[in-house]
Each structure stands twice: as C-alpha cells, then as structure tokens.
Image (cartoon, rainbow, N blue to C red):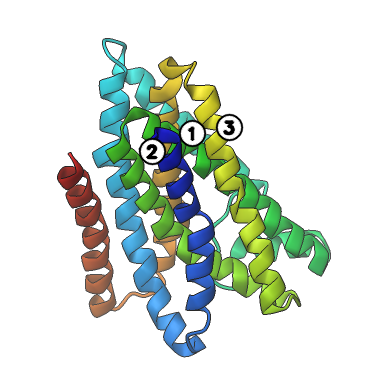
Amino acid sequence: MDILYWIIIFSLLGGVLSVIAASAFLLIPEASRNRALPHAVSFAIGALLGAAFLALLPHAMADNGAKDFHQIGLTVLIGILVFFVLEKMVLWRHCHSDHCEAHTHHEAFEQGSQHSTISMILIGDGLHNFVDGILIAAAFLTDIHLGIVTSIAVATHEIPQEVGDFAILLHSGLSRTKALLLNILSSLTTLVGAILAYAWLQDLSSIIPTVLAIAASSFIYIAMADLLPNLHKRTRLSDTLKQLILIVSGIVTIYMAHSSLH
C-alpha cells in the first residue's frame, strides 16, 4: 500500500474516528462515564509515554545518524516549552469535563461569552489536530510501524480529550448533533496537516528526526502536564494502584505493538 494511503487512513483514525468514539462515550450515563474516564486517561498516559520513549525518540536518534544526540534532547526541551506557551494562550489544552481549568480562565477573560468558548474549543482543537497530523505523517515517512504506533498513541489521548470538548460544547448550548458535526470538522485538520506534511517532508527528509523529537515532546507534555495531574485528585491506595496498572498497560501496549510490527 502506498505510504500516503497509510497516512490518510491513520490520520482519520486519530481524528474523525476518535470524535465518533467520544460521542458514543457520551451516551453512557454520566455517573458511569465519570468512573470510566479516569481509567481511559491513565491508559492514555502510558500510551503517550511509551510512544515517546520507546518509539519516537529511538527513531529520532537513529535517523539522526552521526549528529550530536544532544540536539534531539534540546529539541524535546524546546518543544515542551512551546507547548507550555501554547497552553497558556489557550490554544493547546486537554479538558476531560466541562470544568476544565483552561476553559474556566478563558470564559472569565471573555466575560462568559458562549460564542468565545465555542470558538476557543474549535480553534484550539483544530490547531492541535493539525499538529497531530504532521506528527503522524512524519512517523509514517520514517517507518510504517512507527506511524501505526504513533497513531495509536494519538487516538488514546484524543478520545478522552474529545469527551471533554463535547461536554463543554453541550454546556455552551449546542445541540448534540451540531457539537458532533463541529468536532468532526475540527478533527479533519488532522488529515490536512498529514497531507501537507507528506508533501513537504518528502523533500526535507533531513528534518524528520527533528519532527519526531517534537512529536515526543508533545506526547511527554500532554501526559505529564495535562493528564497526570488529574490522577492526583484520587489519593486512595486502591485508586493509585489502578492508575499505575493502567499506565503500565498503556506502555506495554505500545511496546508490544512496536515489537510485534517489526
């Protein structure tokens, strides 16, 4: 199969199908959904960290050839700082309920405007998905197996993210159908980013290790800065053990997927 077809298929998996899965998740009664969502977040943390440290960074360093590996490390650090700034600008955030901190701050700044809340969600999600598309394309251009593992990691964190987006959009007054359609349109930027990156990176293969390092920084930042703090809200030993088991399960899933595909 042509590499472009792989990129298109898995970009849709990471974007549109994640939105549809999230919308189906919202059909679950709220009490059950609130119990299940932290488990999905825990698994996503493991998948993101596994993809970053077991797949993306090793490939970035291997493809960097004889160049200084410190450059890859510096790129990861700069990437983390860039995502920090983007989140401060409310262009990059991971909400898993309608009580998202970033959402609350933005509403206060905009005097509670529903339209500004909806715009913030769609613009931020569109930018995030566009970047995800670039990262997926770069991974596939490096290795098909790496592309698949990267897409899995994207999908695992996009589903709980989209659940949070849906909750906020519905809370802002949109109907379920309109919220679904707007989220699907926003998710299509994953495909746009992937196709543009495919055309661009083919002639600039030398920068692919840098893009992979940025992908790793994105996954590390999302896992550690956005997702992990949510788990600290549950302090019971039983909850901590469940979280740890699910995080390890996410890591093992990526490890096995990466190993079995090679």
**Residue 53 drawn at (x, y percent):** 27, 40
Quarter assignment of residue 208: top left
Question: Does label 1 or label 2 sit earlier along the sequence?
Answer: 1
Helix, strand or loop status at disc 1? helix
From the image, tell me which residue sits under label 3. 196
**Residue 101 drawn at (x, y percent):** 60, 64
Q: Quadrant of the C terminus?
A: top left
How far apart are labels 1 and 2 at the CA level? 9 Å
In the displayed structure, 24 sits above or below 52; it is below
Could you tell me the amino acid type at mark 2? Ala
Near-viewer residue (79 or 141): 141
Q: Estimate how packed mark 3 is, as few (under 14), some (14 to 19) or many (20 or more) residues with alpha carbons within 10 Å.
A: some
Could you tell me the amino acid type at mark 1? Gly
Could you tell me the amino acid type at mark 3? Leu
From the image, tell me which residue sits under label 1. 79
Residue 216, labelled with which disc? Answer: 2
Q: Is residue 217 visible?
A: no
Question: How many numbered marks appear?
Answer: 3
Q: Nearer the viewer, mark 1 or mark 3?
A: 3
Q: Nearer the viewer, mark 1 or mark 2?
A: 2
Marks 2 and 1: in contact by CB < 8 Å?
yes
